[in-house]
Amino acid sequence: MSIQKIQRLFVVLALLLVFVAMPVMAQLKVGYVDTQYIMAKYQGSIDIAKQLESERAVIASELQTMEKDLVDRQKKLEQQSLMLSEEKKRQQYEELQTLYQQLQQQAQVKDQEFNKRRDELLGPIVEEVDTAIKNVGDENGYDFVLKSEALLFAKDSINITEKVLEELQKDKGTATK
């Protein structure tokens, strides 16, 4: 068999496959949701965002206090440096270095704790949103529901974001417009 005949056979088979698959594809129902929009509008996630913002402010304040203490000690050392012996200067600079390292470690620990706390608080909200998406998909006969973040283009007619917000509101009365 020549290469041209193989190519023609391949084209015919590909066209046949497309024509057979088109009715199946036409029957699929696809929708998409904007989960970022849902999280911005869903009262449960809004409340948690406020709580996390408050907790982040407390952490920032604690770290700023530690940083201010470090800066104050450094200024004091610089002011007294002419009156101190070399050994005393070295000792105080080492103390400053230790304090700086402790500040960095504390900032890392606080950041990790905050991230863990955020995940703990948002986990149930994400589950509620996922459940609402599944419920809307099931109730409306969708074969696929995609996240809008993964799409390059989609028609607004298949956007089910508002339906999901309504489902969340129905379940808890906590979606905002």
Image (cartoon, helix red, strand yellow):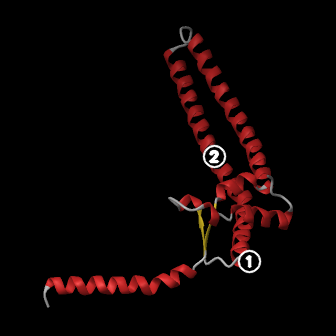
Q: Is residue 117 among what the camera can see? A: no
Indicate the secondary structure of the residue bearing disc 2. helix
* Residue 61 percent across, percent down from the top left: 72, 34
Splitting the image into 4 quarters, where does residue 160 fall?
Answer: bottom right
Q: Is residue 3 left or right of residue 88?
A: left
Measured in 3D between alpha carbons, the distance from the residue under mark 1 to the one under mark 2, in whole angstroms, is 41 Å
Q: Is residue 72 left or right of residue 124?
A: left
Is residue 45 depicted above or below 81 in this figure? below
Residue plotted at (64% across, 59% down): 34
What amino acid type should be assigned to the residue bearing mark 2? Asp
Q: Nearer the viewer, mark 1 or mark 2?
A: 1
The residue carrying mark 2 is 111
Q: Is residue 171 left or right of residue 103?
A: right
The residue type indicated by label 1 comes to Glu
> Which label number is shown at residue 120?
none
> Which numbered marker is on residue 139?
1
The residue lying toward the viewer, choosing from 9 and 172, is: 9
Which residue sits at x=20%, y=86%? Answer: 6
Q: Residue at x 53, y 19 (%)?
A: 89
Q: Earlier in the sequence, mark 1 or mark 2?
A: 2
- Corner quadrant of residue 4: bottom left
For the point 70% across and 63% down, which residue is it? 126
